Image: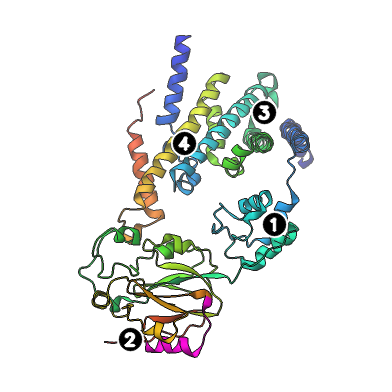
């Protein structure tokens, strides 16, 4: 009885099976022929260069992803060295693949936010209740008293693919453990507060302010702004220059020394701070 | 002849607006919600779907009509295998087209090459092939028009959605509704709007 059923099933179903098998066979043959006839030769160097890149597709090089950057490098080797997360090691590896020599490269760049003012340190004229993005807020006059400092709506946080930026009490703060140096945040900031700096030390010293207002105006807007007094430049004239009421540091020349430490300690508003993986907390604002 | 062209035009309008696969059949919702973030991406996806759906609809109709539904082979009951055959044809044809594009149109391959393998498994494609069978489409030209129309309908739907979502990105949406929820609500309202067309063509 069971045998009869099985035979019956077989008799009824074999044409359907044959059709599917036939179609499958037809397509496999067509695809086999196509895969031979339509084969595209890919330069093996592109694959090797791609393997040397970090593969995080961050776009810091200006190309859509690691894949298209690898293709561009093989076509034009002058483009080596645009990979910020990979840094000098990556450039050297790529150069090896392409039988070239690279020179220089310098230290890996990491972002520094040129502001140290948390919400409590700033003066506000009114509460901003518009679109919660820095770009939108920046278009509003007097969104906060300081027209140079961090707005704290986190455009840079949204630009960061690596969860390395967070707004802490109204100030965008970099987590240097997670940062890859892709510079997406620097491009996102509408106030150009974030600068890519070559980190020659684990912790870099920086003047965390961008305000070019005179000392009195800066002081009325923020407790921890740079007032352009020039005390830091008196301690270390090589490193600090004061221009437009704002002290700037030459990051390339920076070496920790007693002079730099003195400049930091004597700064009346405490705007000179350390930024980096193990940076100590900046000293609190004076009342 | 004029009658025939009218039928084709009606078939085209009906599948684009009235029987739109996305709005009325809820097919292809995955790319409809997933790739509708930006208009240019949405349009690229729509074009790729249009291309694949036209190809798949035509091929499956041919196989369906001349082999599976062939009266001479009716005794074998080949109709039961149609879903599997459709899938096979869609996958095989897309694979072939992908290779062809890669060889002869590298720039086109770069622009929507990544979408092609994704679309192969899209339910809108298989859905259209099944509908062609269900609706008893009687000739090849009508099958081609319907397939092409389905693709255009999908492109229209996904582009409208992308346009709305680009504006939604700047809107002040309540926190609990941000992201997927507001997108689904938008999709529902859009569908309701398109329900207004129902019954326009019998």
Judge by depth and name the residue closer to the eye, B47 or A44: A44
Measure the C-alpha gap from mark 1 to mark 4: 37 Å
Helix, strand, or loop for circle 4? helix
Residue at image mark 2: A268
Magenta span covers which residues? A253-266
Q: CA distance from mark 1 to mark 3?
A: 56 Å
Rendered residue at 65%/53% (across/down): A73
Chain name for mark 3: B
The reply to whether the C-beta atoms of the residues labelled 1 and 3 are less than 8 Å apart is no
Decide: is A277 above or below A84: below
Residue identified by numbered label 1: A49
Using the rendered image, report if marks 4 and 2 lie on a common chain: no
What chain does mark 4 sit on?
Answer: B
- Chain on which label 2 sits: A
Residue A212 as seen in the image, left or right of residue B70: left
Of badges 1 and 4, nearer the viewer stands 1
Residue A77 lies, with reference to residue A230, above or below; the image says above
Circle 4 residue: B155
Q: Earlier in the sequence, mark 4 or mark 3?
A: 3
Image quadrant of residue B65? top right
Q: Nearer the viewer, residue A54 or A189?
A: A189
Q: Chain of mark 1?
A: A
Q: Residues within 10 Å of mark 3 (few under 14, many from 20)?
A: some
Residue at x 36% of width, y 49% of height: B185
């Amino acid at each position: 009885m069971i045998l009869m059923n099985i035979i019956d099933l077989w008799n009824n179903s074999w044409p359907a099976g044959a059709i599917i098998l036939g179609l499958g066979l037809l397509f496999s043959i067509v695809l086999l022929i196509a895969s031979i006839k339509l084969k595209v030769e890919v330069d093996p160097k592109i694959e090797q260069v791609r393997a040397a890149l970090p593969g995080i597709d961050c776009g810091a090089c200006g190309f859509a992803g690691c894949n298209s950057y690898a293709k561009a490098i093989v076509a034009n080797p002058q483009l080596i060295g645009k990979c910020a997360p990979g840094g000098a090691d990556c450039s050297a590896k790529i150069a090896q693949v392409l039988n070239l020599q690279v020179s220089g490269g310098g230290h890996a760049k990491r972002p520094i936010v040129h502001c140290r003012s948390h919400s409590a340190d700033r003066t506000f004229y009114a509460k901003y209740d518009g679109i919660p993005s820095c770009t939108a807020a920046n278009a509003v006059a007097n969104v906060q008293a300081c027209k140079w400092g961090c707005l704290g709506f986190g455009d840079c946080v949204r630009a960061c693919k690596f969860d390395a930026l967070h707004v802490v009490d109204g100030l965008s703060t970099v987590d240097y453990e997670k940062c890859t140096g892709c510079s997406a945040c620097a491009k996102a900031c509408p106030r150009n507060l974030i600068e890519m700096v070559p980190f020659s030390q684990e912790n870099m010293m920086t003047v965390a302010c961008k305000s070019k207002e005179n000392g009195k105006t800066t002081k009325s807007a923020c407790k921890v702004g740079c007032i352009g007094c020039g005390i830091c430049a008196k301690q270390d004239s090589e490193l600090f220059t004061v221009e437009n009421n704002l002290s700037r540091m030459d990051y390339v020349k920076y070496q920790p020394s007693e002079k730099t430490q003195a400049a930091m300690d004597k700064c009346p508003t405490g705007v000179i701070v350390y930024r980096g993986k193990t940076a100590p907390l900046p000293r609190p604002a004076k009342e | 002849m004029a009658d025939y062209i009218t039928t084709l035009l009606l078939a085209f309008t009906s599948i684009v607006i009235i029987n739109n696969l996305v709005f009325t059949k809820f097919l292809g919702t995955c790319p409809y919600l997933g790739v509708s973030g930006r208009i240019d991406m949405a349009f690229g996806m729509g074009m790729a779907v249009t291309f694949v759906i036209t190809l798949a609809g035509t091929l499956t109709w041919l196989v369906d009509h001349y082999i599976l539904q062939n009266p001479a082979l009716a005794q074998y009951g080949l109709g039961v295998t149609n879903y599997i055959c459709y899938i096979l044809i869609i996958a095989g044809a897309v694979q072939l087209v992908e290779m062809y594009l890669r060889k002869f149109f590298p720039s086109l391959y770069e622009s929507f090459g990544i979408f092609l393998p994704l679309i192969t498994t899209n339910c809108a494609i298989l859905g259209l092939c099944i509908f062609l069978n269900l609706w008893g489409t009687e000739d090849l030209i009508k099958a081609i028009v319907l397939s092409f129309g389905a693709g255009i309908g999908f492109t229209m739907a996904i582009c409208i959605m992308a346009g709305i979502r680009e504006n939604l990105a700047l809107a002040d949406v309540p926190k609990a509704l941000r992201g997927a929820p507001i997108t689904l609500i938008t999709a529902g309202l859009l569908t309701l709007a398109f329900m207004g067309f129902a019954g326009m063509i019998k």
